[in-house]
Amino acid sequence: MIFDTLTNVDNYKGLDRVHTALKFLAETDFSKIDLGRYELDGDNIFYMVQRYSTDPNKTVSQAHEKYIDIQCMLSGEEIIGVAPISADKKLIEAKAENDVWFYECKTEPLTLFAGSFMVLYPNDLHCPGVAVGGTAAECRKVVVKVRV
């Protein structure tokens, strides 16, 4: 897992597609892009612009096998709970066709704020969308999917 701000994208030049995605995030004005799914490089790199309310009671984590998640906050803030895939966990639901597995597990909280991003690899469990301070808030975020 990587947690950083968009001002530091050049630190990740050696990460090929991840750097391509981070550079795109840093150079794009998302205020002009509608909510939805868009392709950068077919199924190798695509992104989703999302708007949602955080949930103070969210506890379900997820993991992916085929894609790296890059979650970049545009406005608002949320807690993303993180844990290694090797953590003690209970599988709740598997949706292999959508490359997502849902788990119950203990995670450590990190706050994603405007201009910050997390790179979450297949070995990173993550629970996004948790309300900061227990109060729901509106967020606008971009999630880039990078094929492993």
Image (cartoon, helix red, strand yellow):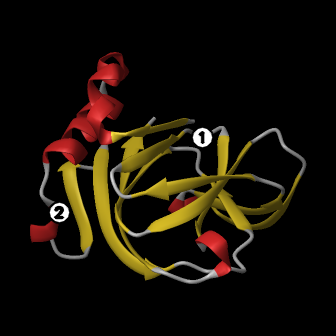
* Residue under the image location 60 percent in, 58 percent down: 80
* Residue under the image location 26 percent in, 73 percent down: 36
Closer to viewer: mark 1 or mark 2:
2
Name above or below for residue 82 compared with residue 2.
below
Q: Give whichever of 118, 68 is nearer the camera.
A: 118
Q: Quadrant of the N terminus?
A: top right
Three-letter code for the amino acid on which mark 2 is drawn: Phe
Question: Is residue 62 shown left or right of residue 3?
Answer: right
Mark 2 sits on what residue? 30
**Residue 102, percent across and down?**
71, 64
> Would residue 43 be seen by someone viewing this image from the given angle?
no
Residue furthest toward the front? 133
Q: CA distance from mark 1 to mark 2?
A: 26 Å
Label 2: element kind: helix
Question: Is residue 86 shown left or right of residue 63?
Answer: right
Q: Give whichever of 91, 125 is nearer the camera.
A: 125
Mark 1 sits on what residue? 122
Three-letter code for the amino acid on which mark 1 is drawn: Pro
Residue 56 occupies quadrant: bottom right
